[in-house]
Amino acid sequence: MNKSENILMRIIGRLFSTKYMVRRDKIIDTLPDSKEAYGGAVKLAVPAVIEMVGIALMGLLDTIMVGVIGDHAVAAVGLTNQPRFIFFSFFFALNIAVTAIIARYKGAGNQSAANACLRIALLIGVVIGSLLTLVSILIANPLMQFSGAQYDTIEPATEFFRITMYGFMFAVLSQTICAAQRAAGNTRLTMIVNIVANVAKVIFNFLLIQGRFGFPEMGIRGAGVSMVIANVLAFTLAAASLFYKGGFIKISFRDSWKPDLTVFRSLIKVTSGSLVEQVGLRIGFFAYALVIANLGTNDFVAHQIGMQVMNITFTFADGIAVASTALVGQSLGKLRTDLAVMYGKIGLRLALIAAGMLCVGVFLVRNRFPLLIATDETIVQTATGLMTIIMIVMPILVSQVVLGGTLRGSGDTKFVAVTMILTVGLLRPLLGFLLTYTVGLGLIGAWLTIIIDQLARLIMLGIRFLRGKWLLVKL
């Protein structure tokens, strides 16, 4: 090994060693060595990554199966995504709070408070979930029109949306249970729940979309029914995990379901910050989706293909962020701010490794992937062109997602909310419209906006992480 190679190895070793991740004056007690620390993070992250990527791949298969019906069907299903996410936004916020709070209780060894938190969250889910299910079914048609549905997509989009929302309650409750289990470190369990449910969805898609083995041919309705079946199965499996006697997260019907006011206040405090974030996110994503939808069906389908790749990238980042959230929360529950900083930095390093691997993968399939979904040559060429932009944005995306997960794990949801509102809620739709229509860059302009949006988020969250104020948040 020559001198330059030796220097490079020393730099890499220093970059990844836990010895240099926390300032000496900030160390409270002995830090775990690199092997132990990375081992703990990877143990939580790998099942979470497998779970998230598995869900994304099943979603991709879902899109491919729907694509058999025609490009208009792909567009119709895509149009339902943002409205459905809007209805889920409150529960995304609630589950962020559940994860942050239960991780703290796990670190502090307070099992009764952790389970009280879950019981409150489930009660909230039943009440608000029932109301939103009814509302979503009643306003499905005007909502799809507002989402940018064209004459050839309005009917199938409305039908698909209505059917899928019948499984809304089951999805809400299963996600809340899984959020609690992840906070306690049970990422392997939630991986099994979600992978099994999504495999079931693909199987029923195969049986119902085109009508195989005696099942009726239901077209896009079959894809909706498959999603409902998957949601019911996920809830059944997740609920079953709560009755395991040896688990940290568990429920008994003999427990008191009267809300603990201290836990309730903590839950509402963190949820309120996350809810502001989620509302801003959904409004921003919705407005951005309208920018794309108005370009026409071909560009919208090409955009959907690109977003499938982005979703897979996001799931890698989100899986690592799940581990960071749990480990940071548990560390703060132990009053170990030094461990929280260390695990936040470990998460970033794992994210960059994942980004490098993903960039290589996208480069290898950039010309072939669009052919799996679309048949129109114009759509395929446009989608292929988006792959270069996706490779640029990948390292930025995974880094900011993991940083966001780290800050949420501490309960610093208000700052994350402000960041998301400024970037996703305002910057993305406004700049997207400007570059797409005013400057005249079309779909490429919309995707250049994604790079700028992601970079702005990374800078804001990175500065917050380095300043360390997130370590002082009280729940």
Image (cartoon, rainbow, N blue to C red):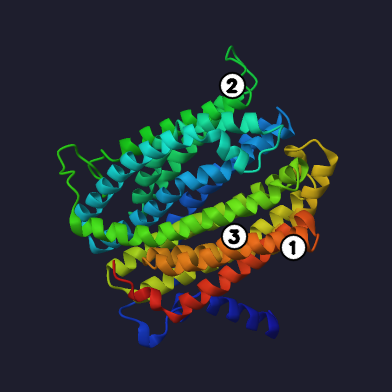
Point 54% across, 43% down: residue: 83
- In this rendered view, identify the residue nearer to me: 317 or 408: 408
- What is the x, y in percent for residue 398? 57, 62
Point 63% across, 29% down: residue: 156
Q: Amino acid at mark 2?
A: Leu
Q: Dot 2, how many residues are within 10 Å of its Cα: few (below 14), some (14-19), or many (20+)?
A: many
- In this rendered view, identify the residue nearer to me: 55 or 457: 457
- What is the x, y in percent for residue 474? 29, 70
Name the residue that disc number 3 marks. Answer: 354
As drawn, which residue projects farthest toward the right? 377
SS at circle 3? helix
Q: Dot 3, how many residues are within 10 Å of its Cα: few (below 14), some (14-19), or many (20+)?
A: some
Name the residue that disc number 2 marks. Answer: 208
- In this rendered view, identify the residue nearer to me: 124 or 38: 124
Give left or right: position of 312 versus 389. left
* Cα–Cα span, label 3 and label 2: 36 Å
Name the residue that disc number 1 marks. Answer: 435
Dot 3 and dot 1 residues touching (CB under 8 Å): no
SS at circle 2? helix
Give left or right: position of 27 versus 64. left
- What is the x, y in percent for residue 370? 75, 43
Is residue 31 in sight in this rendering? no
SS at circle 1? helix
Quarter holding the C terminus is bottom left
- What is the x, y in percent for residue 5? 68, 79
Quarter holding the N terminus is bottom right
* Cα–Cα span, label 1 and label 2: 41 Å
Q: Amino acid at mark 1?
A: Leu
Count of all numbered marks drawn on residues in the image: 3
Disc number lying in front (3 or 2): 2
Point 57% across, 37% down: residue: 142
Dot 3 and dot 2 residues touching (CB under 8 Å): no
